[in-house]
Image (cartoon, grey):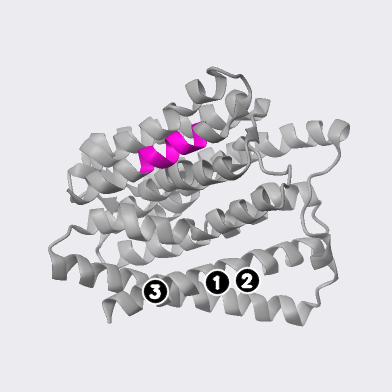
Amino acid sequence: MSVLYILLGFTLLVVGGEYLVRSSVALSFKLKLSKMVIGLTVVSFATSAPELLVSLQAALDGHSDISLGNVIGSNIANIGLVLGVTAVIMPLAIDKDFYKFNWPVMMLLSGALYLFLLNDKVISFWEGIMLISALVVYLYLLIRRARLRAKSEGEGSVNGALAMTSGVKIVIWLLIGGVALWGGSELLVKGAVDIATYFGISERVIAVTMIAIGTSVPELAASVIAALKKEKAISLGNLIGSNIFNIASVLGLTAIIQPIGLNDPKVLTADIFWMLAFAGVLIPLAFIPKRFVFARYKGLLLVIGYAVFIALAFI
């Protein structure tokens, strides 16, 4: 039954995330927001919803290692799995925003998360406030930079067909998305805890592997489909942006509602260093040997590294 719970939970998270993105974009068009603002803010928040619901549910149920492991594992998966597989399918051009803005912000927030946990083994209410405040500043700068870029390059692409969606359909999509995400998070956390208990595996290991991959499925599916269609809209900077949202919005909001304690010391001595390593290696990969191109072999290196991380997590 626990395996069934996990499979159903994954399925509901994917369905819920898809409907939430659709309804959020359609609602944003009704509110007369520009495509650029929708793409940078609304869609980013919506695609982080699975991580948020799972982390919040786990924290409220007293399984804080799942909250932390989910975010840390998702950030590792976003680089090692999502970025790695996407680059193998289609080499990515590296934009200036990656190394001038998104990557430094990601490293700062990752370092802040490490210091928060190192300090007192808890992400407190006020530290959650600090993370949300950092997110607000990041969004302001992100939109400002994008507007300047849009003047010369034009607005980014967001599905304009959703602008014609009726209000009734938006409400139905929101309800489907919300209920599916809530149900998926409940089933996923319950199934993961039961399996961890049955096999004697720590909640932390289940969280940084199975749950993290599950909550990263929407990003992986979207990136792979876009890569197969050879869409040039995929950029390294955009993919890295999801890691920023995971730390700032998911852990920030969760900590404000329910402080997140550190139970398993390996989160601090192993997992978070893997996250920092995957984030840090992107700079040398971006510039050596061929600058500004994330080639297929670089993606393969990330996928191999991620496979090593998963193997070591279970040993």
Q: Residues within 10 Å of mark 1 (few under 14, many from 20)?
A: many
Magenta-drawn segment: 298-306
Residues marked 2 and 1 touching at CB (< 8 Å) = yes
Q: Earlier in the sequence, mark 3 or mark 1?
A: 3
Q: Residues within 10 Å of mark 3 (few under 14, many from 20)?
A: some
| Placement of 73 over or under 182, stated as above or below | above
Disc on res. 16: 1
Identify the residue under disc 2.
19
| Placement of 36 over or under 18, stated as above or below | above
Magenta-highlighted stretch: main secondary structure?
helix
Q: Amino acid at mark 2?
A: Tyr
User: What whole-number distance in Å separates the C-alpha atoms at marks 3 and 1?
Assistant: 14 Å
Residues marked 3 and 2 touching at CB (< 8 Å) = no
Q: Residue at x 41, y 56 (%)?
A: 213
Identify the residue under disc 3.
7
Q: Amino acid at mark 1?
A: Gly
Q: Residue at x 36, y 54 (%)?
A: 70
Residue sitting nearer the eye, 102 or 81: 81
Q: Amino acid at mark 3?
A: Leu
Question: Label 2's element?
Answer: helix
Horizontal side of 292 relative to 76 (left or right) equals right
Question: Label 3's element?
Answer: helix
